[in-house]
Amino acid sequence: MHLADGIVPVGMALAGYGASAGLTALSLSRINRLPDPGAGLPRAAMLVTVFFAASLIAIPVPPASVHLVLAGLMGVCLGWYAMPAILVGLFLQAVMFGHGGLTTLGLNGLIFGLPALAAFALWARIGGRWPDLAAAFAGGGTVLLALALFAGTVLLGLPASVDPAAERLALMALVTAHLPLVLAEGVIVLVLLRVLRRVEPRLLAHA
Amino acid sequence: MIRPCSLLLALALPASALAHGAELTATPVQAISLEARYDTGEPMAGAQVQAFAPDDPQTPIALGQTDAQGQFLFVPDPAPGRWTVQVRAAGHGAITYFEQGANALRVTVERTQNWGQRALMVALVAWGALGTVLFLRRNKRG
């Protein structure tokens, strides 16, 4: 679900960079306001590694295969650190595996970063009262949100030479293949957060 | 009774419509065969193939769609220079190049990684990320 190079027009890719930079600046200013801004760095580094490696784990959903997104987990565990962490993870995925392009790094940052921050907002709001519900929604909901952002970006940047009907059909197939992942990530984040709450509650941004 | 003008019209019909012979010319040409796969190994079926000419890399030229095996065969335009071919489906895609010379065709094939190389990269990134942060924390404490 990473936007490759050459898929959207240059103007859109530049706008993506601009919006991603704005969101990162906002995140960094919020991190700076924390009592110890460096305290969350080891946790962020650990989750960048998990996020980076997760895109290599392909889960077969016949006839295609999908990979874990884990933006929800990043949001809940990292809070405002999620956006810079996701950008670092996406950059490494692009240079090392060719997952997503370098020109589309800004757009991919938004596709994964916005759902991660939404998951963080959800966790901060209802995580204390209904932690299981918040975790499941943060896990599954972020996949749905990322899918919607991805499909919207592709359709918005469709060049005239591409057959729109065929591309819509391909996008529908992609979204359908990812629907089991919505459930799977909901369960994964639910179980992980249950374990973390019991074993190491300090790993959560707002427990 | 046939009126003169109708007779004239009948005589003016194109000769090909009345011909019974046919001609067929077969000329061997150089073609490019593409095979598009996701890095998981599945074929990119029904993906759209477009080309960008050497003199106009901004305007894509639609070529067609890959088959169920992700394959596509086309005869390249004879215009010399570096052509770009893109295969895209649902926001995913790959780009390859071929050089159309005076009398030769050269195709650039991109290198792919195996699982060992990927595992090594994951290990290096993990080491780099955690190592950098722990180093910074240690310096701060010291």
Image (spheres, grey):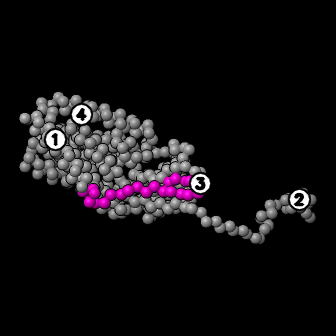
Q: Which residue is mark 1?
A: B133
Q: Residues within 10 Å of mark 4 (few under 14, many from 20)?
A: some
Amino acid type at image mark 1: Val
Quarter of the picture holding the N terminus of chain B: bottom right
Tags 4 and 3 touching, CB below 8 Å: no
Q: Nearer the viewer, mark 4 or mark 2?
A: 4
Quadrant of residue A103 in the image? top left
Q: Is residue A175 visible?
A: yes
Q: Is residue B85 visible?
A: no
Disc 4, SS: helix
Q: Which residue is mark 4?
A: A27
Q: Which residue is mark 2?
A: B8
Residue B51 vs B1, above or below: the answer is above
B88 left or right of B52?
A: left
**Where is residue B79 shown, x and y percent of the image?**
59, 51
Residues rendered magenta in the picture:
B98-119
Structural distance between the alpha carbons of marks 4 and 2: 85 Å
**Where is residue A183 shown, x and y percent of the image?**
25, 55
Q: Nearer the viewer, mark 2 or mark 1?
A: 1
Is tag 1's residue or tag 3's residue first in the polypeptide sequence? 3
